[in-house]
Amino acid sequence: MNPILLQNFIELISDYIGLHIREQDYDSLCNKVFVRVKLLKYSSPEQYYQLLANQNQASKDEWEKLIVLLVVPETYFFRDRGQLELLQNVILPEIIKYKIASNEKNIKIWSAGCSTGEEPYSLAIMIQELIPDWKEWNILILGTDINEVALKTAKKGIYGNWSFRLLDEGIKKKYFYEFKGEWHLDQELKNMVNFSNLNLVQDDFPRNNDLILCRNVLIYFGEEQISLVIKKFYNSLVKGGYLITAHAELYGQRLGEFQVKVFPQSLVYYRDEDKEDENYLPESLPILEEKRIPIKKSWQSLLKNSSSTTKISIYDGIGDDAKKQILFDLNKKISLNQNNKIAIKTLPQTSNIQPSKSEELLLEAEALFEEKDYTDAIKKAEKFLIINPKDIRGYKLLAQLYANIGTYERAIFYCNQAIERNSASVEPYYLLVNIAEEQGDLEGAKSFLKRIIYLCPEEIPAYIELGSLYAVEKNMTRAKKMKNIALEMLKKLPADDIVEYKGGIKVSDLIEYLEAV
Ligand SMILES: C[S@@+](CC[C@H](N)C(=O)[O-])C[C@H]1O[C@@H](n2cnc3c(N)ncnc32)[C@H](O)[C@@H]1O
C-alpha cells in the first residue's frame, strides 16, 4: 500500500476508535484492509478508505466489520486476581458502606470495553456476594464495547471453560450451570447486567457512575485519545467515584483532574473535586498489607547497557556542567570497576567542581543503596527530593529502595511519580515488572513489559522476559514469537557486546541460550 494512504488509514482509525497502530503492525493492518477490499470486491484500497471516511450508514456498517479485525477481545472471569480482591475487599465495601450511610440503595457500575462480558458479570457476582439483600437495591451494571460480535456473546451469557481459567470452582458452580459442554449464566445474574455498543472516542458517556472499570483497553490507544477518554471518564463519575484501569495503562499519561490512591494490588483513580495540587505527594500512603519479600532481581539488571544506565541515573534533570563533571568522575570509577557497579561511592577528592549539597545527598543515597543500607538510603533520598521535588532521579531511587525492602505500594507510587515526570523512561516499568512478578501478578507483569516495548521497541530484555511469561502460561505461540524477535535483534549486534540481561551476558552467549530453550 502506498505510504501516504497507509498513513491516512492509521489516522482515520486513531480518530475513530482511538487505536494506535504501531510501526511493527503496519503489515498486519495492510493485510486486514486487503481482506476487506477483496470481500467487498473493491478495485483499490483508496475506494475502501473513502467508504470508511464517509459519515453515512454504509460507513458505520463497514466500521463494525473492520473493528472486529482490529481490536483484541481477550478477557476472562475474575481477570487480575489482585485488582479483583481490591475491589471485593476495599473499593466495593467502601461504596456500599457510603450508600448505606447516606440511605441511598443504588450503585452504578460501568465496565467500559467489556468485550464478551466476563468483567461485568464478575462484578455482578461480587455484588451478590457482598450485598445479601441486593434484590432490595437498585444495582445498575453496564457493559459497553465497540465490538458488536463480542457484545452478542456477552448478551448470551454462555461461556466455554477457557473463560473460567481463574475462577474458583465453587463460584462457577454457584452462578453457572452446564449444558452440552458449555456454561450458562444464572438468569438472575444475567439480568443484573445491561450491554450496549459504545465507542469510547466518539460517543457520550453514561453519567453518575460510582465505579468504572476500563481495563486492557487504553493500552492500545494513542496518547491524545487516552487523554480525551480520561477527561470523559472523570466527568462521568460521581464525586468520590473510582476509575480502575489495568496496571500500566495510565502510567506516564496526564491524569487531568484525577487523584490517585495507591494500594499494594493496584493504583486506582478517583474523582475528588477538593483537589488543589495535581502533583501533590501524600504525607502517608494508605497501606493495606505490607509484603516483605525482597526483590531478587535488580531492575537495573534487566537494562540493556549498564554503563549507560549509570549515566542515565546520574544525568536526568541536571545542568550540562554538572553532567560533564559527573561523567568524568564516573568514567574514572567505572574503569576501575570491572563489575560495572554504580561507581559513585568515592568520588575523587581532587575533583575541581564539587557537587552541590543536594547532588551530594543523592550520591550518598546511591552509595548507601549499594551497601544495602536501605533505611539510611531512603532518608537521604527523601531529603534530596525535598530539595529537588521535580528530579526524577530521586523518585527512581526511592522506588528501587522501597521495592528492595518489600514495601511495594510505596515502590509503585514512586515508580508512578518517576513515570509522570518522564513518560519515556523504561526503568520504572522494569521495576513494576519485578514487583508484579514477585506478587504473582502475571497479567500486570505482561502489561508493563508491553508498555516497555511500546516505549522502546528495541528493548531486547523486555521481549525475552515477556516470552518467558507467555511460556509460563503455556502460550507457546506467543512465547516463541517473543523469543524470535529477541533473537532477530540480537543477531544484528556484535557478538561480543554485553546485553545487560540478568546481570550482563554476551550477545553470542544469549543467542546460544535462547536457541537452546
Ligand atoms: C482486551 S479487551 C478487554 C476486556 C476486559 N476489559 C478485560 O480487561 O478483560 C479490550 C476491549 O476494548 C474494546 N475497545 C477497543 N477500542 C474501543 C473503543 N474505542 N470503544 C469501546 N471499546 C473499545 C475492544 O473491542 C475489546 O473488546
Image: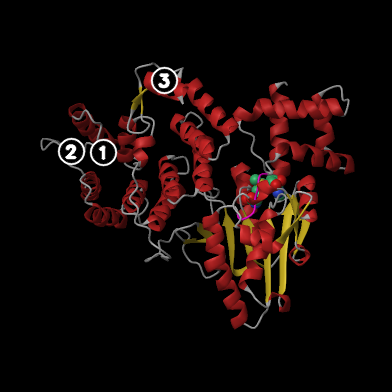
Q: Position of residue 181 (x, y in %)?
A: 75, 48
Q: CA distance from mark 1 to mark 2?
A: 8 Å
Q: Earlier in the sequence, mark 3 or mark 1?
A: 1
Q: For this view, does 163 lie left or right of residue 482?
A: right
Residue placed most toward the observer, 371 or 295: 295
Residue 272 figure quarter? bottom right
Q: Does the image show residue 364? A: yes
Q: For this view, does 157 lie left or right of residue 359?
A: right
Contact? badges 3 and 1 (CB < 8 Å): no
Residue indicated by mark 1: 322
Q: Position of residue 464 (x, y in %)?
A: 47, 31
Residue indicated by mark 2: 353
Q: Which residue is pictured at 51% across the width and 48% down the height?
A: 444
Q: Earlier in the sequence, mark 1 or mark 2?
A: 1
Residue 77 on the magenta segment: yes
Q: Position of residue 477 (x, y in %)?
A: 60, 31
Q: Position of residue 419 (x, y in %)?
A: 45, 47
Tell me the kind of residue under disc 1. Answer: Ala
Tell me the kind of residue under disc 2. Answer: Ile
Quarter of the image that includes the N terminus = top right
Tell me the kind of residue under disc 3. Answer: Glu
Q: For this view, does 426 lie left or right of residue 116?
A: left
From the image, state whether disc 2 or disc 3 is nearer to you.
3
Residue indicated by mark 3: 512
Span shown in magenta: 74-78
Residue 323 on the magenta segment: no
User: Mostly what secondary structure, the magenta segment?
Assistant: loop
